[in-house]
Amino acid sequence: MLNKLIFDDSILSFHRISRGQNNNNSVNSSLNSLTINKKDFEKQIVTLKKYFNIIDLNKILNSKLNSKKRNIVLTFDDGYKDNLTNALPILRKYKVPATIYITTRFLQNKCNIWWYEIEKFISKNSQLKFKFLDKSYSFSLKSKKNKKRCFEILSSLFKELNYNQQNNLLRKITKKGNRTQYKKELLSKQDLIFLNKNYLITIGAHTHNHISLTCLNNKDSILELKKSKKILENLLKKKVYHFAYPYGSKKDATLRESNLVKKVKFKSAVTTQIQFHKIKNKFLIPRLHINSKDQGIILLLKLSWFYKLYQIIKEKF
């Protein structure tokens, strides 16, 4: 009973699980927070298993769930290879289910990732000047603080663009026509087929190009959603019912987007918004982002009603 008074059912968001320590010298702390080393990830799983029921995404969507412990669902975004090489052995060891949302463009060997490419560029340069969409940009990159600020500004800009515009912006920034490819960092078709055969893993879609649907009109949004769904279903020879919004903030996942996702015949869609878990709309489901610092009591506090209430109040004021 105490468990239910303190904690809330939660869907947790992960990205990458690494072999070694995180890069603390990253020019962007939020990007660094996407990666958890596997020792810390295993500690998190042990803590979660002790205090929660870790269940499959399909089960938490069932409103008739009833148990003494609160329920937790694990999800991974984008489709990184370390989900297979580093996360899966730990999931198997503790018999923990997880959902992996795939950006399907990566499966077609179009493995450019703007957030890693601009981070690398910013870290190696002391100045950046360019013009984009009739606006001039100029950044001094001589300090770590300036580099982080530049990354934040550029990230906000990239998130408002469609895929072609993102590539045009990358050309303006790097002065290079060819994009850096991160194929070795991402799951291949064969990797995904292997993961899909494991009873612990559910595969979901994360758009084709990893862009915010708010950048597109209704017609193009539906094409983006249908394309990702079709590629996965053709590859896995099964229906794909679950979706995750890229970025997933209140700007990226509104009632408009939820209606489009529903129209394409998905059965659920997760955001990165923090709310109390009671699912009012299965196409705007809240999630909590988990990073490497979330260990022990800190992790439990993050999963409590108090943390969610604090974040909701903070956002309003």
Image (cartoon, rainbow, N blue to C red):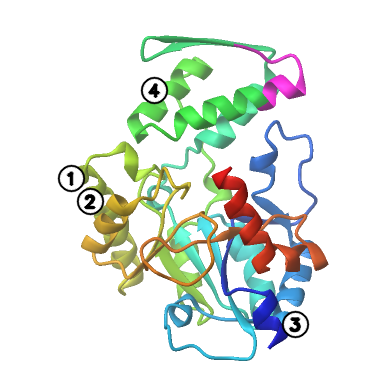
Measured Cα–Cα span from mark 1 to mark 4 = 22 Å
| Disc 1/disc 2 C-alpha distance (Å) | 5 Å
Residue at which label 1 appears: 219
Q: Residue at (71%, 73%) from the top-left corner?
A: 45
Label 1 or label 4, whichever comes before in sequence order: 4
Is the C-beta separation of discs 3 and 1 under 8 Å? no
Q: Disc 2 on helix, strand or loop?
A: helix
Q: Which of 289 and 15 is in front in this view?
A: 289
Q: What residue type is labelled 1?
A: Lys
Please name the residue shown 28% across and 50% down the image: 256
Find residue 50 and name its label.
Answer: 3
How far across and down, in percent of the image, does residue 57 sit? 48, 75
Furthest residue toward bottom: 67
Residues drawn in magenta: 139-148
Q: Residue at x 54, y 79 (%)?
A: 200
User: Which residue is tagged 2?
Assistant: 222
Is label 1 in contact with label 2 (beta carbons under 8 Å)? yes
**In this view, the mark in front (3 or 2):** 3
Give the image location of residue 47, x and y in percent: 76, 75
Q: Which amino acid does label 2 sit on?
A: Ile
SS at circle 3: helix
Q: How crowded is mark 4: few (under 14 residues within 10 Å), some or many (20 or more)?
A: some
Dot 2, how many residues are within 10 Å of its Cα: few (below 14), some (14-19), or many (20+)? some
Q: What element carries label 1?
A: helix
144 magenta-colored: yes
Q: Distance between the residues labelled 3 and 4?
A: 48 Å
Q: Nearer the viewer, mark 3 or mark 4?
A: 3
Q: Which numbered disc flags the more N-terminal residue, 3 or 1? A: 3
Where's residue 164, x and y in %? 33, 30
Could you say which disc has been placed on residue 168 in the image? 4
Seen at 43% across and 83% down, the residue is 63
